[in-house]
Image (cartoon, grey):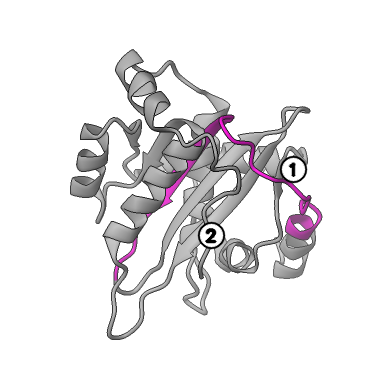
Amino acid sequence: MARAQRRAIWDALREPYSPVEGDPTWIGVDVGLKRDSTAVVAVQRDNKGDLHAICRLWVPTTDNPVDITDVMQYLRELAKAYDVRAISYDPRFFDLPAKQLEDEGLPLVEVPQSVEGMTRILGSLLELIKRGELHHDGDEALRTHVLNAVARFNEHGFTLQKSKSRGRIDGVIALSLAVDRALRPEERPMETEFAWAERRDPHLVDPPPRSH
C-alpha cells in the first residue's frame, strides 16, 4: 500500500476523544533507549465500542538515552487514573522495570516479539483499522510512526519494519500491543484490582501530559 494511501486511511480515523477516568483501559509499551524511542499507547472504548488511542513518546538524544524511570512513573499515573486491565510490553529493555511494576500491583503482560505472535497481533490491528473501529486524536508523532512502518510479508500475514528512511515505528508497535489486549480482555487477579482501586485519585480527570 502506497504511503499516500496509508496516510489518507490513518487521517480519516481522527476523532476527538477525552479519556474517561476509571474506565477500562489497555496499554501497550515498546521500549527503545538509545536509537529507538519509547512509546506508551493507551486505548479505551467509547459508547459505540470503538477503540480510541492516546500516545506518549520519549525520544532519546545523542547525549541522553530515555530515562526508563519516567516511563515507569507515567504507567503508575495511568494506573491511578484509569481502570487499567493490562499493560502489554516487549521484554527487550523493559524486563526488570516490568517485574518491578508487577510487584507493585500493575497488570503487566509480557509479549515476546516473535514472528508468529506479531503477525497475529498486527493482522488484528489492520482489520480494526479497515473497519474504522480504531480512532486517534491526531497526534503527529504517532502518525509519523504509523507512516514509517512498512509490511514485511510471511506465509501467514505480515510483520512491520522500518521504511528505507529508518524512521521510528515504536508508536505503532505499542498501539498494536494495546489493541491486542483490548480485543481479548482477561480477568485480572483480585489483588491487582484492589491494590490500585485504593490508590486511584478521584480528582485526576485529565490524562497526564504528553511529550514528544
Judging depth in this view, the residue of 141 and 10 nearest the camera is 141
Residue 183, picture quadrant: top right
Eyeballing the image, is 187 above or below 140?
above
Judging depth in this view, the residue of 183 and 165 nearest the camera is 183
Judging depth in this view, the residue of 87 and 83 nearest the camera is 83
Main secondary-structure element of the magenta-colored stretch = loop
Relative to residue 119, is residue 91 drawn left or right? Answer: left
Total labels: the figure holds 2
Find disc 1 in the rendering and name its residue.
130
**Magenta-drawn stretch contains 27:** yes
Picture quarter with the N terminus:
bottom right
Relative to residue 92, is residue 201 drawn left or right? Answer: right
Q: Earlier in the sequence, mark 1 or mark 2?
A: 1
Relative to residue 184, is residue 11 drawn left or right? Answer: right
Task: Kindly give the residue lying farthest to the bottom in the view shown.
Answer: 62
Q: Position of residue 79 (x, y in %)?
A: 43, 37
Nearer the observer, disc 1 or disc 2? Answer: 2
Q: Which residues are magenta?
A: 9-33
Relative to residue 10, is residue 39 drawn left or right? Answer: left
Q: Image point 38% across, 32% down: which residue?
A: 199
Is residue 8 visible from the viewing direction of this image?
A: yes
Eyeballing the image, is 140 above or below 76?
below
Eyeballing the image, is 164 above or below 91?
below
Say what amino acid the circle numbered 2 marks: Pro
Say what amino acid the circle numbered 1 marks: Lys
Residue 44, picture quadrant: top right
Find disc 2 in the rendering and name its residue.
209
Q: Image point 74% across, 37% down: which residue?
A: 133
